[in-house]
């Protein structure tokens, strides 16, 4: 009888020992799980912070680059405004009234004078046919550069000029069969004739006169106003 009681007590003790060991394992597993979870969460938080910081750094870099680019462009334009371009002709005291109907201009293509109340789209617009002088002159008043050409211009010239105009807001291009020069660059009161699109004065003219010092209405819209509709 005493032996049976001892055996039962031993089993209970062993069961209790196993229970305690199981509880300790559970506590260790929970501790390990919490530690791992903490590391993962910390990594996620750290990673998220890194992503946010990295994104902010990239945005700051883009802003700094854009600011630097704008500053460089403004500086280049300011310098270009001071440079005299060989061969450029200018006209002073041009009238600028809004009128309807045809206007008899003293130069071909015209660079200023009375003009139509509606301007041409000059947001880097390349026209494949001749445009009305009166609407084109209004675009010049807004600070645009107008590129024209006759049948002496080569396909390569036209392609080069078209690409440049398409990439330059406040500029437009159209054929002008009756002009004497192969390629003519016009701004308000200002004009340059060249024989080739490769002439370095083309870039100089754009840099100086796109929204340049000759502009009568700086910042005025160059978007489509319906002149060719």
Image (cartoon, helix red, strand yellow):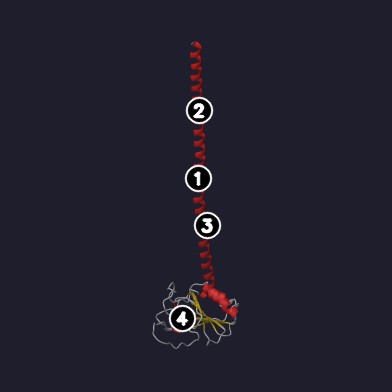
- Determine crowd level at label 4: few under 14, some 14-19, many 20+ residues with C-alpha closer than 10 A: many
Which one is nearer the viewer's eye here, 8 or 68?
Answer: 8
Q: Position of residue 201 (x, y in %)?
A: 58, 77
Disc marking residue 136: 4
Identify whether 64 is placed above or below 109: above
Residue at (52% x, 43% y) in the render: 43
* Contact between labelled residues 1 and 4, with CB atoms less than 8 Å apart: no
Residue at (55% x, 74% y) in the render: 163
Q: Tag 3, which secondary structure? A: helix
Location of the C terminus by quadrant is: bottom left
Q: Tag 1, which secondary structure? A: helix
**Which of marks 3 and 4 precedes in the sequence?**
3
* Residue at image mark 2: 22
Q: Tag 4, which secondary structure? A: helix
Residue at (51% x, 50% y) in the render: 51
Q: Tag 2, which secondary structure? A: helix
- Determine crowd level at label 3: few under 14, some 14-19, many 20+ residues with C-alpha closer than 10 A: few
Q: Residues under labels 3 and 2: Cα distance?
A: 57 Å
* Contact between labelled residues 1 and 2, with CB atoms less than 8 Å apart: no
**Which of marks 1 and 4 precedes in the sequence?**
1
- Determine crowd level at label 2: few under 14, some 14-19, many 20+ residues with C-alpha closer than 10 A: few
Is residue 157 visible in this depiction of the protein? yes
* Residue at image mark 1: 44
Q: Residues under labels 2 and 4: Cα distance?
A: 91 Å
**Which of marks 4 and 2 precedes in the sequence?**
2
Closer mark to the observer between disc 1 and disc 3: 1
Q: Position of residue 195 (x, y in %)?
A: 59, 82
* Residue at image mark 3: 61
* Contact between labelled residues 3 and 4, with CB atoms less than 8 Å apart: no
Q: Residues under labels 2 and 1: Cα distance?
A: 32 Å
Q: Residues under labels 1 and 3: Cα distance?
A: 25 Å
- Determine crowd level at label 1: few under 14, some 14-19, many 20+ residues with C-alpha closer than 10 A: few
């Amino acid at each position: 009888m005493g032996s049976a009681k001892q055996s039962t007590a031993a089993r209970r003790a062993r069961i209790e020992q196993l229970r305690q060991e199981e509880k300790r394992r559970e506590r260790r597993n929970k501790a390990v799980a919490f530690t791992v979870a903490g590391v993962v969460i910390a990594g996620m938080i750290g990673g998220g912070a890194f992503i946010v910081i990295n994104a902010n750094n990239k945005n700051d870099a883009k802003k700094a680059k854009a600011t630097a680019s704008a500053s460089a462009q403004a500086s280049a334009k300011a310098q270009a405004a001071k440079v005299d371009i060989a061969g450029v002709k200018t006209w002073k005291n041009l009238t600028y009234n809004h009128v309807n109907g045809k206007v008899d201009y003293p130069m071909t293509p015209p660079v200023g004078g009375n003009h139509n109340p509606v301007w041409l789209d000059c947001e880097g617009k390349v026209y494949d046919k001749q445009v009305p002088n009166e609407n084109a002159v209004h675009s010049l008043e807004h600070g645009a550069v107008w590129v024209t050409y006759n049948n002496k211009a080569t396909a390569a010239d036209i392609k080069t000029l078209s690409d440049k105009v398409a990439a330059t807001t406040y500029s437009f291009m159209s054929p002008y069969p009756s002009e004497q020069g192969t390629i003519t660059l016009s701004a308000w009161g200002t004009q340059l004739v060249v024989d080739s699109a490769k002439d370095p004065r083309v870039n100089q003219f754009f840099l100086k006169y796109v929204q340049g010092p000759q502009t009568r209405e700086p910042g005025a819209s160059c978007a489509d106003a319906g002149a060719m509709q």
